[in-house]
Image (tube, rainbow, N blue to C red):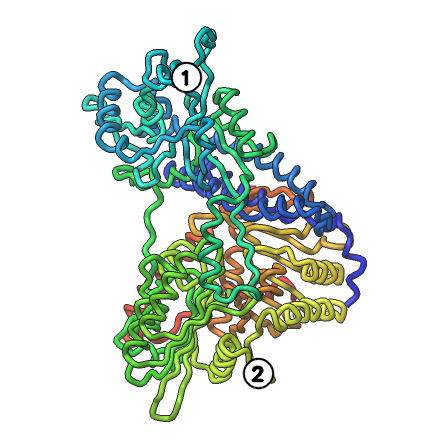
Amino acid sequence: MDIAPYKKPEYFRNRELSWVSFDERVLNEARDKSIPLFERLKFISITSSNLDEFYMVRVASLKDQVHANYTKKDLSGMDAKEQLAGISKRTHELVQLQYNTYNRSAVPSLEHVGLTIISEHEKLTKEQAEYVDSYFEENIYPVLTPMAMDSARPFPLIRNKTLNIGALVQKKEDSLLSRAEDKKEKKGKEKEKEKELEFATVQVPSVLPRFILLPQDEKTGQRYVILLEEIIERNIGKLFLSYDVVCAHPYRIMRNADLTIDEDEAEDLLVEIQKQLKKRQWGEVIRLEAEEKMDKRLLDILKMEFEIRDADIYSINGPLDLTMLMKVYGLDGFDEYKSPKYTPAPVAQFQNDKDIFEVIREGDVFLHHPYMSFDPVVDFVRQAAKDPGVLAIKQTLYRVSGHSPIIAALAQAAENGKQVSVLVELKARFDEENNIVWAKMLEKAGCHVIYGLVGLKTHSKITLVVRREEDGIRRYVHLGTGNYNDATAKLYTDTGLLTCQEAIGEDATAVFNMLSGYSEPKSWNKLALAPLWLKDKFLYLIGREAENAKAGEKAHIVAKMNSLCDRDIIEALYKASAAGVKIELIVRGICCLKVGIPGVSENITVRSIVGNFLEHARIYYFENAGSPEVYMSSADWMPRNLERRVEILFPVEQEDLKEKAIHILLVQLADTLKAHVMQADGSYEKIDKRGKKLICAQDTFCEEAIREAEEAKAKDDPAKDRVFIPEKSRITQEDE
């Protein structure tokens, strides 16, 4: 495949700036007045949470490159310094827009519906002030630890992501401290008229609620909340009784939280990761958020102590850390301003008294979360743990919930004498601590715990159950695009497959043998694995479409994923587009590909869907000259997924299930309410709804899942499938 003409830097978009575009799309949802008010608060909160992680990992990595004098350019021709400059400009604009949205839209709208957020303690009424002061004395004061900086006390360690209040203080003339110092002065020396200002700080305790409800106005029914930091700021003088507080302002820092572990040198990966986690608290400061009205003298001290550039300082016009709006969302009494809560529908095939293994033997089961319940996945492991015929359970775990029923089932299975092997990925970013706890617990229960492969993250989602049956040993497999996390399965859109196909069972066994014993089989049946040959598989499938287009055959690619930034994949897509292949991409987040380049990407469209649920499924469709192939995977089209992680691509071959996967793609391509379409200049625009049918893909899937469950329950034979068939598949229709 000759891809040389498609390697120009101007054909690629910078990965980091593309991510900022994604966060802008999230914020756009917060600005959409058609969305219920409290849902808009969620999107403001998510924007903040996203930006935090982006800085701790991606920006931190770029700063490391600058420190190391690494000058290699990225796909778009930008070096690390240029990327940091671009990021700083765009994220400052993003934060300003975020706070404009909060101050000008969210706060007045909340007040209108009966909730006032008091973000300045000076605005408290007399009665409210008395309540707040009493609350401080009883609930807050005992928890606080004020810290000062002087010749005897160095600048304190400020922990990553914590909210703090910095203050400038001045010794009182008549204080004991002041008198003690005066005695030390030599006789006859004139005392300085102006006392020196000193720095002090106090951490806003994360163990206390960020919002404190004040007494409700009995006449109007208006509810009031005040921020915890405002209560502390109002009473900060009580923490420094020998000082006058000259000024006090909140601030917050972000540190480099990227883990750097030399796995070859680490004798025990578990211990090494535990050590590295502690270092996150004192990594390099890469971002400082400070109240906009902060005293310049105080800001200068913070700048000096944190050794931070102006470009990395964010002056905030409002409360710091807007992730706290999730707490506002959780307040009772405002349900009418929230979207109705969706309860995942039961999976049609399991609405009966049949054993789960019996259902799977009747045919593969397609799962689409959160529209369909995650319960069958949990029950798959639970029933396997109890079933006397089950000999072994093997599973990969990347991220799990705080009280995971799957973990409990695996532990029970081991206690029941079954062979249980679990690969726990200790390097799952920001879930390392959680995973260490689970790994230790599983080992204690008697499970064989594997900590992954050196140099690779295991990101694949696979469960293998080996069962003895009348006709011999049978293997049951679950493959998915999302984590074995029952909590996020209600929030993330993912797809999965339950099967007992012999060929897939053999491949699943080979996967676990490879993970535990480093033994790769001579050949694979149906699964494709990264980093072995998954990338080659994708390049082959894309290249085949290009060849089919040249030969006058039907050629069409539809791919849904989270991110697209692999150079080789993008170049292959450009070549396919130039050959005449119609390419429709549904990419939630990062997309380094450009559309509309003459002779290169004119046949490519890119859309991003941002809705109530986080789009997380990966589905890949290839027309294959009229014999379509559909795959699902844990992998995005990113170098890390294709080259540095263990990932699995699996085919959807059962015709009715293939149609379901195609249906998901078709509905998302038809979305007119939540889709943002990439323009030639890299910006995203929402679809012009005039004259178009209003379609929200996520709402459509909710309605269809409920309807399918109800219809299955009403039938005498609940195992009988109902197939999602669009009016003759548009994917085929358009290419005829």
Q: Callout 2 environment at 10 Å: few (<14), some (14 to 19), or many (20+)?
A: few
User: Amino acid type of disc 2?
Assistant: Pro
Decide if residue 102 is in sight here: no
Quarter assignment of residue 586? bottom right
Mark 2 or mark 1: whose residue is earlier in sequence:
1
**Quadrant showing the N terminus:** bottom right
Residues at circles 2 and 1 in contact by the CB criterion of under 8 Å: no
**In the image shown, does 518 or 326 lie closer to the viewer?**
518
> Which residue lies under the disc numbered 2?
521
CA gap, disc 2 and disc 1: 80 Å
Q: Of tags 2 and 1, which is closer to the observer?
A: 1
Camera-nearest residue between 521 and 702:
521
| Residue at which label 1 appears | 184
Quadrant placement of the C terminus? bottom right
Q: Residue at x 41, y 32 (%)?
A: 164
Q: Does the rendering let one see residue 211?
A: yes
* Mark identifier at residue 410: none
Query: Height in image: 303 above or below 354?
Result: above
As helix, strand or loop, the secondary structure at mark 2 comes to loop
List x then y, in percent, for residue 454. 55, 68
Q: 141 or 692: nearer the eye?
A: 141
- The picture places residue 470, in percent across and down from the top left corner, at 34, 92
Q: Position of residue 611 (x, y in %)?
A: 46, 48
The answer to whether 55 appears left or right of 125 in the picture is: right
The residue at 45%/38% (across/down) is 157
Furthest-left residue in view?
218
Q: Secondary structure at mark 1?
A: helix
The vertical placement of 34 against 1, above or below, is: above
Q: Quadrant of residue 619?
A: bottom right
Badge 1 local density, few (<14 within 10 Å), some, or many (20+)? few
Query: Type of residue at label 1?
Result: Lys
Q: Position of residue 603 (x, y in %)?
A: 70, 56
